[in-house]
Image (cartoon, rainbow, N blue to C red):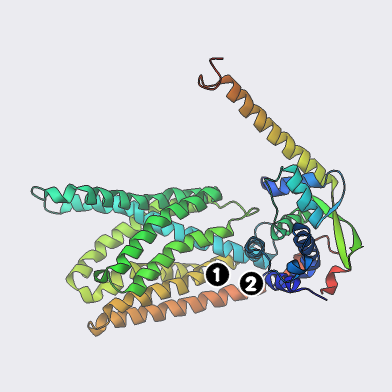
């Protein structure tokens, strides 16, 4: 579990690593796709998040591969990271459900109420 | 062969601590270049001679700031620096919060003690006076800003600090344009001081430990009560002899408060952490600048105010030196970043470039 509430970039980085290990730029692209372009990670932000997640044992190095004369590092989710993401997703889903129920119960008359 | 873009990006990365760069630089460069070429696939030559965007550089600068002003899990020295800056932020928010609490106290006291005015002139209750009343009320924003920071609502504190800063900034600029309001350097310095809490609040990033609220909450009413009492006691001195004003004006009071706090801290041996002496030492140059710029208004007067100001500056400098010496000694006892950094490092990362 993380010590503090999970930030949105951290949430998306962990989500991007659920299916396969990814390298830095791969994570940036996957996060943009997952968030439908809403979250566009700068490289400085990404590595700040990766550093924190690695420090909390939520992600780890999977492998290194040469690519166009450079080494690409691939990161993967740890078991602890998977559990943290599961808990955070459940928390967000519960919050969303509570808000949706409350909104449905108190629908203003002006919002489609006369149809 | 490295491109101009890579060189420029690596130059920006120098903002990051060396230990961090050793672990992450190659991967950051690799990811950055991939993103840069992918964003403009039709013009790789153009990419090679381009510069990192302002957004990229800003993200590195923010990361550097967060790493150097560490939160929970950061290397001990970075954590101590972070704690010191966070205390500076809280102190810089506490001061205007106390001052805005003092305002209604002074107004009540004045109403009780000053002779009752006769019929108030019509012009005095027009738009201007209402506007000024509203303007003065804007200072009260510092109280929720301070409380938000104390209770851990840092985002709210940052937003409110910006909102509270705007009237302070406008007032300072207006006063700077008015030659009757003292020397421009002093007004400019007050403006800078009003911006310090906003800047220092950047040290409250994710992973910062919760502030121990109780002492900071107690500090607000106690600070207001002490300031009120001191102001009442020293007001006659100020009114009777204007030459003594540097002793009891606001910068003079700040100097006295800081020197007292430093003496109490240096006399106590309970806390071996470097954060408090560091925080107080960081406040010394801020106050020294304020004292010097506000003294400029006394140029050409008698020798008394300048002598008082010079003594205050000397005392501040001596206090700052003592605090810095204690802080450095305590910082040196902490382990270095290399012993504590964590990262999914590999054998390749240690090679550097």
Give the labeled residue for mark 2.
B331
Q: Is residue B191 above or below residue B157?
A: below
Q: Is residue B33 left or right of residue A42?
A: right
Q: Is residue B121 above or below residue B171?
A: above
Query: Residue sitting at 27 percent across and 50 percent down?
Result: B131
Q: Does the rendering let one see residue B222? A: yes
Q: Does the rendering let one see residue B20? A: no
* Image location (x, y in percent) of residue A101: 63, 23
Crowding near pointer 2: few (<14 within 10 Å), some, many (20+)? many
Query: Residue sitting at 72 percent across and 55 percent down?
Result: A49
**Label 2 or label 1, whichever comes before in sequence order:** 1
* Residue that sits furthest to the top in the current view: A115
Residue B57 or residue B258, whichever sits in front: B57
Query: Image quadrant for the C terminus of chain B?
Result: bottom right
Q: Secondary structure at mark 1?
A: helix
Give the labeled residue for mark 1.
B278
Query: Image quadrant for the N terminus of chain B?
Result: bottom right
Q: Is residue A113 left or right of residue A91?
A: left
* Image location (x, y in percent) of residue B180: 24, 70
- Evaluate whether label 2 is on the same chain as label 1: yes
Label 1 is found on which chain of the structure? B
The image quarter containing residue B96 is bottom left
* Image location (x, y in percent) of residue B109: 22, 52
* Image location (x, y in percent) of residue A84: 77, 43
* Residue that sits furthest to the front in the current view: B42
Q: Could you give the CA–CA distance between mark 2 and mark 1, rounded to whole angstroms?
A: 9 Å
Q: Is residue B217 left or right of residue A44?
A: left
Label 2 is found on which chain of the structure? B
The image quarter containing residue A85 is top right
Q: Secondary structure at mark 2?
A: helix
């Amino acid at each position: 579990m993380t010590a503090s509430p999970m930030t949105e970039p951290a949430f998306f980085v962990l989500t991007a690593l659920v299916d396969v290990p990814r390298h830095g730029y791969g994570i940036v692209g996957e996060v943009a796709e997952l968030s439908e372009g809403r979250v566009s990670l700068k490289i400085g932000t990404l590595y700040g998040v990766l550093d924190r997640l690695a420090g909390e044992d939520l992600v780890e190095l999977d492998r290194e591969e040469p690519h166009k004369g450079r080494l690409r590092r691939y990161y993967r989710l740890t078991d602890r990271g998977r559990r943290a993401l599961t808990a955070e997703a459940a928390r967000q889903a519960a919050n969303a459900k509570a808000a949706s129920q409350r909104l449905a119960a108190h629908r203003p008359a002006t919002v489609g109420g006369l149809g | 062969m490295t491109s101009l873009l890579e060189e420029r990006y690596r130059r920006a990365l120098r903002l990051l601590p060396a230990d961090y760069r050793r672990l992450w630089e190659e991967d950051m460069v690799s990811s950055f270049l991939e993103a840069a070429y992918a964003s403009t696939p039709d013009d790789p030559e153009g990419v090679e001679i381009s510069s990192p965007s302002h957004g990229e550089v800003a993200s590195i600068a923010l990361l550097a700031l967060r790493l150097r002003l560490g939160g929970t899990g950061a290397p001990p020295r970075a954590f101590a620096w972070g704690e010191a800056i966070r205390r500076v932020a809280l102190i810089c928010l506490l001061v205007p919060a106390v001052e805005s609490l003092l305002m209604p106290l002074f107004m009540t006291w004045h109403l009780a003690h000053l002779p009752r005015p006769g019929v108030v002139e019509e012009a005095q209750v027009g738009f201007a006076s209402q506007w000024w009343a509203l303007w003065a009320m804007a200072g009260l924003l510092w109280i929720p800003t301070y409380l938000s920071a104390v209770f851990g609502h840092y985002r709210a504190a940052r937003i409110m600090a910006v909102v509270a800063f705007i009237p302070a900034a406008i007032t300072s600029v207006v006063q700077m344009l008015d030659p009757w309001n003292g020397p421009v350097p002093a007004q400019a310095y007050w403006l800078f001081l009003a911006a310090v809490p906003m800047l220092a609040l950047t040290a409250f990033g994710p992973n910062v430990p919760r502030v121990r609220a109780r002492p900071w909450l107690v500090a607000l009413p106690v600070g207001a009560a002490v300031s009120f009492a001191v102001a009442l006691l020293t007001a006659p001195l100020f009114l009777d002899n204007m030459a003594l004003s540097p002793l009891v004006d606001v910068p003079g009071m700040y100097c006295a408060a800081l020197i007292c706090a430093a003496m109490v801290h240096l006399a106590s041996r309970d806390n071996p952490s470097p954060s408090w002496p560091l925080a107080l030492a960081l406040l010394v140059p801020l106050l020294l600048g304020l004292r010097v710029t506000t003294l400029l208004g006394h140029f050409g007067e008698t020798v008394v105010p300048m002598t008082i100001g010079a003594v205050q500056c000397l005392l501040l400098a001596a206090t700052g030196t003592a605090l810095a010496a204690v802080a450095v000694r305590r910082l040196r006892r902490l382990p270095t970043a290399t012993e504590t950094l964590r990262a999914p490092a590999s054998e390749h990362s240690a090679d550097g470039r």
